[in-house]
Amino acid sequence: MSEVQDDDVQEFAALLRRLKDRTDRSYGQLARRLTMNTSTLHRYCAGDAVPLDFAPVERFAALCEATPEERLELHRLWILAVAARQRARTASPPAADSALSSADGSPANSPDSPSGAPEAPAPGKPPHRPRPWYRRRRLLVSAAVATALLATLGSLSALPDDDRPRASDSVQGADPTRTTDAGTGRPKSTKSTSPTPTAASPSAKASKKSSAEPTESAAKPSEKAGQKQPPVGLPLTWSANSHVWQAGCGHDYVIAKSPEQVPPPPVPQDAGTWAATQNAVHGGQTMVEISVQGRTSTAVVLDALRVRVVGRSAPVEGTSYAMDNGCGGALTPRYFDVDLDKDRPIARPVDGNDTGTPIPAMKLPYRVSAEDPEVLLVDAQTESCDCSWYLELDWSSQGRTGTVRIDDHGRPFRTTSIEGLPSYGYDTSARKWVPYS
């Protein structure tokens, strides 16, 4: 491979490495999300190989959150790198220079010399030296790249901001020059350059109407063959479980019933049903486990988690029933601590612990996708009120932002103080509730 060709490949690989270094992910993590081998991705970034299809390069740029300008530059360098590798594989021997010169428009033999002998230079004029073949091809490839980039920029400028290609768009979204009319294979034009015959067919009239109204066509990308609609709707899903017990067993419920009327404590997985049948309220603490997952492989960034207290009243009257029997575990998961007694409570990330080994607290913003779900644990506590509250989760993806309300199946979560209430624990040997010491 010549030095010029190798420079094209190395520039492409260098941009891939710069994008990768901006992330906190390893080659292995990125490769899993790109559904490719780790060694293959490493060879692309090292300049040892060039992908023949731009699709994995586009997905790589989306994972690394490349800007639109960086994606255009990445596409330009990819075209040059692929051309360089193809030239290296099909390079002709030096004896074929005369044929290449003829094909490039620089005749090797003079048309006035039938015998093929070269034309003698005019007196006092230096002999003509044809430009080396690889330099001519370099100019041709550069011209092709410039044409493709102009077409791409023209298509992008014609689209409104909301319809421009985003992180998860397909290769056609990143390279509008590939969009074709269905069944023809020819590039699709948004403007008509020739008049429509008077006796045109209905399909021709419809085609003219579409080309005569580029604004409407641009506003409805779904009518363009081969183009993908901009993403709509919520890009993530979530579920919440508020009946999570400390270390799997420690929890209090406040119930307005005597101990004789309350059944034995349930197993943790049946806590929600048990509490609903007893009209129980979380006592002193509510732990909410939130599972968040993207709908597609496109990354969704969780930007912030906020607490909204919608009601404060006097603590519920009743009896506090403890679910634990002295059990406990060595694992304390990382969580978000919320003090509901504050005027403006916040969700504060707290480290966890696993048998003496710290578990780092979760720091927002954090990325999730269909392949990378995440579980958030919120620990809300109160000592003075009957508090009703819910959570707000801010997200961003592909230039869009939004907020998800996380609550208890459409209702606020509810936590009441147990200060001063009679407290009972369950004696498994006597099979009854006894005053809790």
Image (spheres, rainbow, N blue to C red):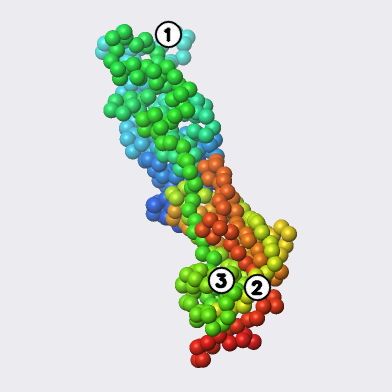
**Badge count:** 3
Residue drawn at point x = 47 percent, y = 77 percent: 267
Secondary structure beneath disc 3?
loop
Relative to residue 313, is residue 101 drawn left or right?
left
Q: Amino acid at mark 2?
A: Glu
Please determine whether, in this image, residue 26 is positioned above or below residue 281: above
Please determine whether, in this image, residue 280 is positioned above or below residue 235: below
Residue 280, numbered label? 3
Residue at far bottom of view: 429
How far apart are labels 3 and 1 at the CA level?
106 Å
Q: Amino acid at mark 3?
A: Ala
**Which is nearer the N-term, disc 3 or disc 2?**
3
How far apart are labels 1 and 2 at the CA level?
113 Å
Residue drawn at point x = 73 percent, y = 59 percent: 343
Residue under pointer 2: 317
Residue at far left of view: 115
Residue 276, numbered label? none
Which image quadrant for residue 221? top left
Between 133 and 14, which is closer to the camera in this rendering?
Answer: 14
Secondary structure beneath disc 2?
loop
Residue 122, numbered label? 1
Instruction: Count residues near mark 2 (Cα–Cα under 10 Å), then give few for <14, some for 14-19, many for 20+.
Output: some
How far apart are labels 3 and 2 at the CA level?
11 Å
Instruction: Count residues near mark 3 (Cα–Cα under 10 Å), then give few for <14, some for 14-19, many for 20+.
Output: many
Report the mark closest to the observer, 3 or 2.
2
Where does the image place residue 384, in percent across and percent down from the top left?
71, 69
Where does the image place residue 48, in percent across and percent down from the top left?
42, 47
The reply to whether residue 355 is in sight is no
Relative to residue 153, is residue 183 drawn left or right?
left
Report the mark closest to the observer, 1 or 2.
2
Instruction: Count residues near mark 1 (Cα–Cα under 10 Å), then give few for <14, some for 14-19, many for 20+.
Output: few
